[in-house]
Image: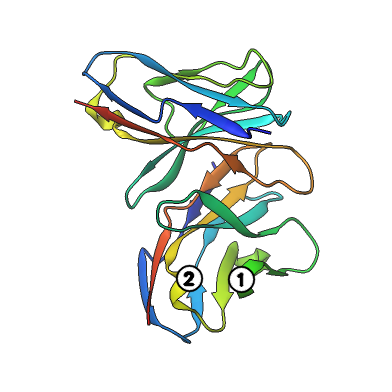
Amino acid sequence: AQSVSQHNHHVILSEAASLELGCNYSYGGTVNLFWYVQYPGQHLQLLLKYFSGDPLVKGIKGFEAEFIKSKFSFNLRKPSVQWSDTAEYFCAVNAQGGKLIFGQGTELSVKP
Amino acid sequence: NAGVTQTPKFRILKIGQSMTLQCTQDMNHNYMYWYRQDPGMGLKLIYYSVGAGITDKGEVPNGYNVSRSTTEDFPLRLELAAPSQTSVYFCASRLQGSNEKLFFGSGTQLSVL
């Protein structure tokens, strides 16, 4: 069965620090991968997605993610975080014909 | 376009009661989903549907039922509500294809007491 695991439950960074949030999935076949962000009191918003091609994908707000097939990973990165990046981040995997599974989320707190 | 419309926004149930959460989308999306969101647990998939007449279990289907008689509607039924079903429920939809953007309803905050 497909599953998604996010390693960090809560990450605290200072502004301008670099960010990397881990995401691993379990599924042996072709996958589509997503990162969503949820700001306090708001819905989930799509940050970026990977379907095929270049494993390094760039999203909105300076975020990027790298798909490493051999490691079943899709880690999210940002070179320099801002206070406004404080939010909860969710990795998601679409594998078996439309079934979209989310990870448990990582809460990011950025100190000004 | 209204997008994904989810009702009600809030509801309090007593243990053992039943209710239906309504979800309608007007974007002609073929995929529809029901998730529950609990603190620290992320979104858990309850049921999903890839088209009218087709539904399938997600990660946490026990205690819930769904139907998909039309492309637009995907109601979630709670039978014999239990305190463990206290959660925030989100309906979502998307169109199969290269965009794959997921559209969410505004959520239903359900308390079972």
Residues B68 and B62: in front is B68
**What residue appears at the point 33 percent right and 53 percent down from the top-left corner?**
B40
Q: Is residue A2 visible?
A: no
- Left or right, A37 with respect to B36, comes to right
Is the residue at mark 2 from the same chain as the one at mark 1?
Answer: yes
Indicate which disc residue A85 carries. Answer: 2
**What residue appears at the point 29 percent right and 32 percent down from the top-left corner?**
B86
* Residue A99 picture quarter: top right
Question: Residue B36: image x %, image y %?
Answer: 41, 37
* Residue A60 picture quarter: bottom right
- Left or right, B13 with respect to A112, comes to left
Check if mark 2's residue and mark 1's residue have beta carbons within 8 Å: yes
On screen, A18 above or below A59?
below
Q: Secondary structure at mark 1?
A: helix
Q: Quadrant of the N terminus of chain B?
A: top right
Question: Residue B37: image x %, image y %?
Answer: 39, 42
Q: Chain of mark 1?
A: A
> How far apart are labels 2 and 1 at the CA level?
9 Å
> How is the protein colored in the picture?
rainbow
Three-letter amino acid code at the position of disc 2: Asp
On screen, B87 above or below A74?
above
Q: Is residue A53 visible?
A: yes
**What residue appears at the point 44 percent right and 44 percent down from the top-left corner?**
B43
Q: Secondary structure at mark 2?
A: helix
Instruction: Decide which of tag 2 and tag 1 comes sooner along the chain.
Output: 1
Q: Residue furthest bottom?
A: A16
Residues B37 and A84: in front is A84
**Residue matched to label 1:** A61
- Left or right, A75 with respect to A55, comes to left
